[in-house]
Image (cartoon, rainbow, N blue to C red):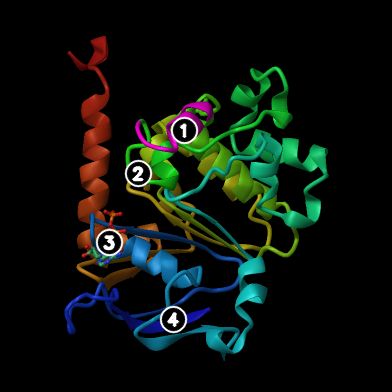
Amino acid sequence: MGIKFNFRYPGSPSGLYALKNVSFTIAPSSMVVIVGQNGSGKSSLANLLTGLTKPFSGDILIDGIKSSFFRREDLTRTIASLTQDHRILPLTVAENISLGDLDHVHSMGRVWEAAELGGASGFISKFPDKLDHSLAVLRTQFTNGDLSEGPLADFAEEFMRYTDISGGERQRLAASRTFMRLLSPRTKLVVVDEPSAAIDPIGEHELFERLRERRRDRTMVFISHRFGHLTKYADQILCMKDGQLVEAGTHAELMALEGEYRRLYDVQAKAFTDDIPPTSDDS
Ligand SMILES: Nc1ncnc2c1ncn2[C@@H]1O[C@H](COP(=O)(O)OP(=O)(O)OP(=O)(O)O)[C@@H](O)[C@H]1O
């Protein structure tokens, strides 16, 4: 995959690019980790890779062919993504997971495997009707308004009764949906954008490990602020700063550069060692 583009969000002042002259190549079946501070452009880059947004100028080349030459739905079928912006629909747990691969909606064995891989099987097991349990969406997911008064009040009260999973559980369900897609041999690119907002560090680490173990010949792109455990496996690290790709290479190469990546890594490592209470040997 070859990438060379500029990107600006619709409505942003002309000249204000979220991504500026970003250019890199992702080798097939490789593992890529994108790092950078808040607002450096990681998610914008991920959205371009998954086709959610289009470059303002420049191209994404897939096997040397411009991505715009492919049918959008054909490309979408080959991509599994996991972001913070996931939707849980008012369907059963099984249906919410199988949305990841509509060809296997009725394959309960596969749905359960995806639930286990996504870390959702624990809380699903607690439902009396397990995978058949019906879920509803949070009010804020379908309206920004307050439904406690007005013509929809009764409906809202009834609807809210079924909202029985937490933010972290929703994230695990979304991860299960991604695994459902990943279990399909059609999936060639997996993009995981910072699922950590609702998942604790151990949950995120385990999730990344399970994704990595199922990489096979897929290209995987990870974005995480807690990247220390990921970058050592990466074939390529892309380090973003202010919308630009400032460094690209392996962990060893970027550490040796002593630049932005090293700075981010050292801050993270320091936070980790600062968290460890001193042992009797240290005193
Ligand atoms: N929908 C949007 N409309 C306009 N500008 C946006 C939009 N989303 C992001 N931006 C801007 O684009 C730039 C890059 O944002 P992006 O979300 O890609 O960064 P990020 O590295 O993923 O940040 P974070 O680590 O905080 O998630 C920022 O300046 C941000 O304010």
User: Which disc, if any, is residue 118?
Assistant: none
- The 10 Å Cα crowd at callout 1, few under 14, some 14 to 19, many 20 or more, is some
Q: Which residue is mark 2?
A: 226
Residue contact at pointers 1 and 3, CB within 8 angstroms: no
Q: Is residue 263 visible?
A: yes
Real-space CA distance between mark 3 and mark 4, rounded to the nearest whole angstrom:
25 Å
22 vs 191, left or right, is left
36 vs 101, left or right, is left
Local secondary structure at mark 2: loop
Q: Main secondary structure of the magenta part?
A: helix
Q: Residue furthest top?
A: 280
Q: Which residue is mark 1?
A: 156
Q: Mark 2 CB in 8 Å range of ligand 1?
A: no
Q: Mark 4 CB in 8 Å range of ligand 1?
A: no
- The 10 Å Cα crowd at callout 4, few under 14, some 14 to 19, many 20 or more, is some
- The 10 Å Cα crowd at callout 3, few under 14, some 14 to 19, many 20 or more, is few
Indicate which label's residue lies in the foreground, 2 or 3: 2
What percent of the width, then of the height, locates residue 111? 74, 40
Q: Which residue is mark 3?
A: 256
Give the mark nearer the N terminus: 2 vs 3: 2
Indicate which label's residue lies in the foreground, 4 or 1: 1
Q: Which residue is mark 4?
A: 3
Amino acid type indicated by mark 1: Ala
- Name which quarter of the figure residue 76 lies in: bottom right
Amino acid type indicated by mark 3: Ala
Local secondary structure at mark 1: helix
Indicate which label's residue lies in the foreground, 2 or 1: 1
Q: Which residues are magenta?
A: 149-158
